[in-house]
Image: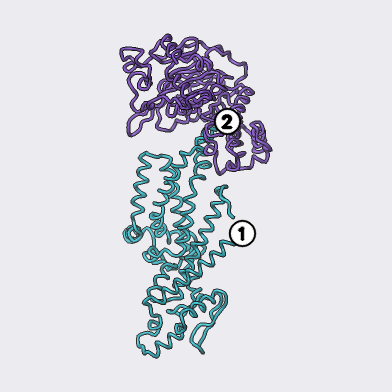
Chain colours: A purple, B cyan
Amino acid sequence: MTQSQSSPTAVAASAPQPDSAPKPTTAPQATKTGAFLEVRNLSVKFPTDDGVVAAVNGMDFTLERGQTLGIVGESGSGKSVTSQALMGLLKGTSAQVTGEAIFQGRDLVTLPESGMRRLRGRNIGMIFQDPLSALHPFYTVGHQIAEAYLVHNKATKKQARAAAVDMLGRVGIPSPDMRFDEYPHHFSGGMRQRAMIAMALICEPELLIADEPTTALDVTVQAQILDLMSELQQETNSALILITHDLGVVAEVCDNVLVMYGGQCVESGPVDEIFYDTRHPYTLGLLKSMPTLTTKSGRLNPIPGQPPSLLALPQGCIFSARCEHAALAGDGVCASQRPQFTSEDGHGTRCHLGLPQILSIRNSR
Amino acid sequence: MIRFILRRTGSLFLLLVAVSFITFTLFQFGPADPASAACGQECTPERVQEARVALGMDQPFLVQYVEYMRGLFSSRLIGAPGAESLCQWPCLGKSFQTNENVSDIIARSLPYTVSMAIGALVLWTLSGVGLGLLAALRKGSATDKFIVGAASVGVSLPIPVTGLFLLLVFVNQFHLLPFTTNEINSPFGPQGPWAWVLNYLLPWIALAVLFSASYIRVTRTNMIETFGEDFIRTARAKGLAPRTVTFKHGVRAGITPVVTMLGMDIGLLLGGAVLTEQIFSVPGLGFTAVRAAVSGDLPVTMAITMLAAFFVIVANVVVDLAYAAIDPRVRLQ
């Protein structure tokens, strides 16, 4: 594998490839030598009785091993759908997935279900939001973890049990050998999420997708789970896609951030730049709406308005209807023309406003 | 577990007492007059009175009831003073009509009912759950719509319609199957299991059409709901084979309402399928119960009512046990 070319839309294009031997089943089929995961123009549409719901519209990003990409956005911005498309969980549904998602040389979008199934769990692991509903209530926690091991490894039940017990220990569950035989309803919320992580990581996948892994948890437990995920990620040198609406979580663990709005990426770049050199009015709004301990008024600062209907996206900038700075661009261009995604040194944005205008907006507050 | 079964057995007994008492009471205040019926064509008031004494109906209502219930625990004497005959334990009384021991009548009728229930049960469970699952897996497709449509038709077809239609086509017109005979009531009889199957096939189908329709609908609805659950997505995300996801993770979680239905229906059906037994002339419990009720044969009516209640209650206990076996969150206390 060679170092990837810096494409204008790349979020994390310049990190060197770690020198780890890929698993035999994941050897690239020599279609591309490029990024570990490269997503290009990924779109997902759901035909419904009311029309076509455009949930994801032309996503581009790349990801390297050992890195963490945070995807942020409000509810319905297409975060989870993006992750499910990458995981191939939309195959066999009415969803229409287009574009490319090249993972270690194979396109996850066109890969048939049978091939995708071999990647799931083994090469791509996934952690879901609500660990209680994501675990099967009728099987023991250990059984469910061992099951994930048994699908992808030629092992006896005894070996699978040993692996699962070991994994439960690694995710910080005390007396894992006893806990193996307990049911999800015997576990606390944080423990369940630890068990989910154990299940997702037992085959040591190179890519881990975590869809709001801490949303259903207490704040103190959240921090523990995030630490655990970062720790295990470093141990296995895997790539992590962290989907969240919590900017605090992003700041804590992510290397790069991708901000989604209305199924589009509106801004992406290294985490520090997103926070301290924000270049999109929506990201500015998100940051401004975060409550801080120092705010004097005691009021929240929400972004006024509603997210656009994914059934009928506006012709112009998707954010224009809620953007308080749309007038600055002049000529009603924000309402009539969809801005292009432009990027510079890995920090990209989709806005008609030029950098000087953005800077003046930032400085005016 | 043991405590659960003991407690349920206790409530089973109380329920049986309640059911028997209600049946007994209803009978007392109903229009039936077994004494005049037993006395026959040429009847004088004296002979009616004799018959009444012979049947034990000269006693006060409560005495009759207690005397009847005593038979469940010991043998007792039945008949007019001086002409009593012994009724062996468990004594359910003697038929007012034939003077036969009711327990013998039950023992004779039950195999027919069981024969009918078992086959129909297997047929409708397989077709109902199978088609319901298929419809759920192919939700929205032409297959799904066809199955749901067929289920709607099936559930609205009463037994007299399907039963008579089947008889007309398979027996009268094309002579593909024999008319049901009383000689076969078990697959272990001299004619062998195949004759048993052929003999009961039509009533099985008639019952299965009616029952499987609701099983299709319940299975389909529950499976669609279950397939949308997060844990199914997790199972897929693990890379499990579709079959494992569908059956091990999906069906086990979505099948519990069907188990409940099954328990109820087995219980009900073992108490006698009145209409089906009438139409196919199967002398099972339902058939016998109708005849007994019409002719005012109290002991037979009582026995079959209590037996039916017994089956329903036992089926419920079995359902509860099955629930605990399927769902570890259910703990029997």
Numbered mark located on residue A222 in the image: 2
Q: Give coordinates of residue A338: x percent, y percent.
A: 35, 17
| Residue at the spot 33% in from the left edge and 51% down from the top edge | B153
Q: CA distance from mark 2 to mark 1?
A: 43 Å
Query: Is B50 or B110 nearer to us in this picture?
Result: B50
* Mark 2 or 1: the one toward you: 2
Q: Nearer the viewer, residue B240 or A336?
A: A336
Spot occupied by residue A240 in the image (x, y as percentages of width and height)? 55, 23
Q: Are marks 2 and 1 in contact (CB under 8 Å)?
A: no
Q: Quadrant of residue A193?
A: top right
* Percent of width and height locating residue B107: 50, 70
| Residue B127, above or below A234 | below
Mark 1: amino acid: Arg
Q: Secondary structure at mark 1?
A: helix
Image quadrant containing the N terminus of chain B:
bottom right
Where disc 2 sits, the SS reads helix
Figure quadrant of residue A282: top left
Query: In this image, B323 relative to A96: left or right?
Result: right
Indicate whether B293 appears above or below B155.
Answer: below
The label number, if any, that marks residue A284 in the structure image: none
- Residue B3: which disc? 1
Query: How many other residues sit within 10 Å of disc 1, few (<14), some (14-19) or many (≥20)?
Result: few
Label 2: few (<14), some (14–19) or many (≥20) C-alpha neighbours in 10 Å: some
Would you place residue B97 above or below residue B12 in this image?
Answer: below
The picture places residue A284, in percent across and down from the top left corner, at 45, 19
